[in-house]
Amino acid sequence: MGCPGAGKGTQSAKLQEEFHLKHISTGDVLRAEIASGSELGKEIAGIINKGNLVPDELMISMLENIVKSTTKGIIFDGFPRTVAQAEALDAMMQRLQRDITEVIMIDLPESEVVSRIASRRQCRKCGEILHVTPGTEAKACPVCGGELYTRPDDTEERVKHRLEVYHTDTLPVKNYYQNSGKYVEIKGDQTPEKVFEDIVSVLKKVK
Ligand code: AP5
Ligand code: MG
């Protein structure tokens, strides 16, 4: 969990590699549907490009098929994002006889969010997330040479709206998990390496 720009995608990529997990970013799932050009994708684009959440039922049904397709441990990135999604996840885990290991909140001061996101570029081909500094902007992905792009929901105005949505819809999810004994907060305003180190030390303590 974490607000826009907290580093969920950055840390998930590192965790996936370290622990051989499956990374499911619900944002990426939705963007892939948009890229497919389907009617559903067009509908989704109209919602997420404005910075709003897609309906819970749609998100949950898209996710269940992906979860069912793997026996690996899963990192959910950006899900659950509402209390209804957290309840549906519990029900899904029970149905599939799986369990939630840990809920990790990457806590980033909101004053950092807009500038962080303004510096983000992502690779259309391999999904690599980059931080660019003005004047030194790479033309192609340093990992695979793919095209770099800026997400349509990354304008300052939309990021501010996403933060509002985060407050109203997603922060209550924190209360949902806080007393579960599986909830931990990590400071997000540290180097990516230190954030990763903190997350790994939490996961190593999990039985
Ligand atoms: P989603 O794609 O999940 O967007 P988000 O939650 O707003 O988060 P971001 O992806 O913007 O940030 P991040 O935390 O992954 O940060 P990143 O690692 O990239 O969702 C997009 C939209 O899809 C939603 O608004 C909604 O419409 C829809 N959606 C998604 N899930 C949904 C759901 N469950 N239900 C309904 N709708 C849903 O890092 C950001 C930048 O910071 C990068 O440039 C990175 O290089 C840099 N960076 C990362 N860590 C550090 C660090 N420690 N120090 C300095 N820079 C750093
Ligand atoms: Mg992300």
Image (spheres, rainbow, N blue to C red):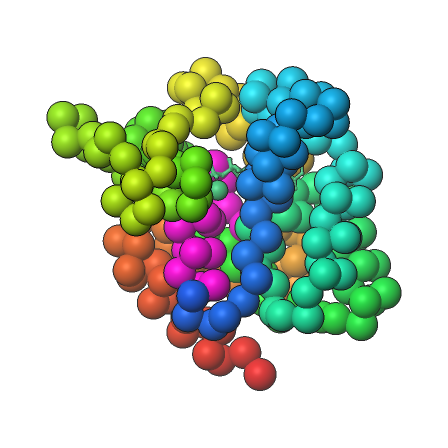
Judge whether residue 123 can be spotted in this image. Answer: yes
In magenta stretch: residue 2: yes
Q: Residue at x 54, y 27 (%)?
A: 162
| Residue furthest bottom in the image | 207
In magenta stretch: residue 47: no
Extent of the magenta region: 1-16
The mark tally for this picture is 0
Q: Position of residue 71 (x, y in %)?
A: 68, 70
Query: With 166 as the anchor, is 61 left or right in this view?
Result: right
Q: Residue at x 70, y 41 (%)?
A: 82
Above or below residue 37? Residue 181 is below
Q: Position of residue 78 (x, y in %)?
A: 58, 45
Query: With 27 as the anchor, is 53 left or right in this view?
Result: right
Query: With 131 as the anchor, is 11 left or right in this view?
Result: right
Q: Nearer the viewer, residue 123 or 192?
A: 123
Query: With 66 as the anchor, is 34 left or right in this view?
Result: left
On-image quarter of the C terminus: bottom right
Q: Nearer the viewer, residue 126 or 132?
A: 126
